[in-house]
Image (spheres, helix red, strand yellow):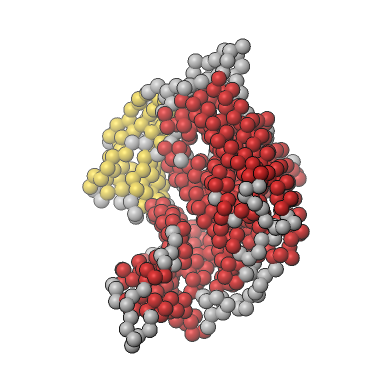
Amino acid sequence: MPSHPMPEFGSFSLLLALVLSAYTLVFGAIALLRSSATQRIDSASRLGETARRAGIGSFIAMTCAAFALVWASYTNDYSVAYIMHHTNRSLASWYKFSAIWSGQEGSLVLWAWLLTTYGFVLRLRHRTDVRLFAFASTILAGIQVFFLLLLNFAAPPFSIQPGPTPLDGNGLNPLLQYPEMVIHPPMLYLGYVGFAVPFAFALGALMMRYPGEKWIHITRRWTMVTWLFLTCGIFLGAHWAYSVLGWGGYWGWDPVENASLMPWLTGTAFLHSVMMQEKRGMMKNWNVWLIFSTFMLTILGTLLTRSGLVSSVHAFAQSNIGDWFYGFILIVFAVCLFAFFKNRDHLKSENKLESLVSRESSFLFNNLVLLVACFTVLWGTLFPVLSEYVTGSKATVNAPYYNRVNVPIGLFLLFLTGVGPLLAWRATSLRSIRRNFILPGVAFAVTAIVLMIVGVRPWLDGDDMHATIFSLLTFSLAAGVVTAISSEFLRGANVVRTQTGKNLFASTLQLVRKNTRRYGGYLVHFGIVVMFIGIAGGAFNTSHEMEMNFGDSIQLGPYRLVCQSFSQDSNPNYDTEFALLDVYKYGKKITQLAPEHRFYIASQQPSTIVALHSTLQSDLYVIYEGKNPDTDRPIIKVFLNPLIAWIWIGVLIVIAGTLLGLAPNLARNAFKTPVTSEQPNPSQLMEAEVHHV
């Protein structure tokens, strides 16, 4: 029997990682039980310390297994069945790397490796709070055991191909041969897997009846970083769908798209409502179940991606391991339920909601709306499965359902984005409401009037009336929200400028550096508004399709596309047909586009390569749909999509705001300025006035 040293090394590493994770789980739990009488754990104790080190060892073993799979891909080791099915010799080197997570077994390797990496960082930082981190480490080890059981017994990535080793592989799915697919799945998985960490901390804090809210402060950065990764993953996937699938859109309410959106919605709710627990000791039960639900939704999303439960262009890894995930979700839910009922008296709120017009109420409404959105998406995603189970026939849920339900939800969320920061904690006075809401209200009204004057009139749009209403309200609300956010910055900056004598820009910078979390949050809200503006542009999309010969042209809006040539080409990886189109805007040539239709040799699958000309005003989106077999002429479809670029700009702003929120505040003494005996301390005045605002 031939020897396969690297696959054998990878299989051994997976088995070792499982043994070490199981050791961390079992003996970590024993150490915690032994220490329960004194409510402390000594990091130097032999049992607890060996469990922690075993967890670190599981990361090393899992890294070795991941390296073995990467090595097999780059060395074209087609004795490994996974490598044979997902790569080929002519595949570009960066796609040989991304092929690691293109299938079932490899994607689970990525999941498990990222999980052990998060656990590695957590275990290195155990001295922050030894007992809490010991609980979190043990809970993470339990999750590690599940995924490593899958890799060792249900979906082994190093299975040897039966018979003689093939000379070449089947190749990578053409849809995945796109640069963004090198980073989209890792980003998405960093978000999915990362929510296991705040889940572990929340469950551990509940089990040990952790006093106070320190565990929230400890986990805040973990949660924000995880949320940021998930946000990047979702929008990288949307941009991939826009650039590769060739249907002119970026979000089709696909079941796997929905699976990534649901934990994002509950995670967003958690990040908002957890501030109420920090500030006022409220919503403790709510927050615990928000983070529990977020983690279980990430597992559900992983199930949907690879179980075959739903049909999706994104579900590139399907198999029969769904029963494993069903069992794991039930176990997690049972553990959470038991811990909650056993310790629910520890979660009593310290304060009550005092007014419906307050910062607390805005967070509460925000949470409710986000959860309603999550439920509607979950219902629409699972309804075909439930209908088939009950009636025997699968009913489909299409985009109109999601749009009809989620459009008003989105508008209300946009409204709350502007209203929330203007409300005070506990209660907001009528005087404060008048002062804070006049300018945003004026901006809303003026924008709506101007838009109707220039032609955005829903009552004249017939079938597109609902889309036009959405756009009109979105643009108007966006103007109000931007005004509200800007006024918050300007008020605080003016206080700083008055007290320090600095210019407005320097004062704004100092204000932001003093409270990065607050103003980073405002910047995130601003990014969300910009994204909504881009989404609202979809109401004005137009398209045109025609068969083109040399010299033929398509006119769409201000653009005219002239066919200069169409041809064919080939390389070892694929054959391609393409057209060369000169693009004119208002009669002036601005660029040349070359949409393609590829046919990949190894996988025997086609793929569309979209040609795109993007500006802040609109995207010119061109697709080569193939040739008419009767005339041998290419069929070209052109979309004109207004404001799409603003979606991607908004994502960049959200990323910047989150990074700002993660940055530490500068020390208070960095803001002190010399004072005379005649005037009060400007640092104190600034802090008091900004707090009042």
- Asked if residue 402 is positioned above or below residue 358 in the image, the reply reads above
Quadrant holding the C terminus? bottom left
**Residue at point 38%, 52% (across, down):** 645
Decide if residue 490 is in sight here: no
Which of the two residues, 248 or 54, is positioned nearer the viewer here? 54
* Whole-percent x, y for residue 437 in the image: 46, 77
In percent of width and height, residue 340 lies at 73, 58
Q: Nearer the viewer, residue 71 or 234?
A: 71
Instruction: Tell me: 460 left or right of 84.
Output: left
Tell me where residue 635 appears, x and y as whole percent.
Answer: 40, 35
Instruction: Measuring from the top left, give residue 28's x and y in whole percent.
Output: 68, 45
Q: Nearer the viewer, residue 505 or 450?
A: 505
Tell me, yes or no, if residue 561 can be seen here.
yes
Q: Furthest residue to the left?
A: 588
Query: Vertical placement of 353 versus 630: above or below?
Result: below
Q: Which residue is drawn at the image coordinates 57% and 25% (left, top)?
A: 9
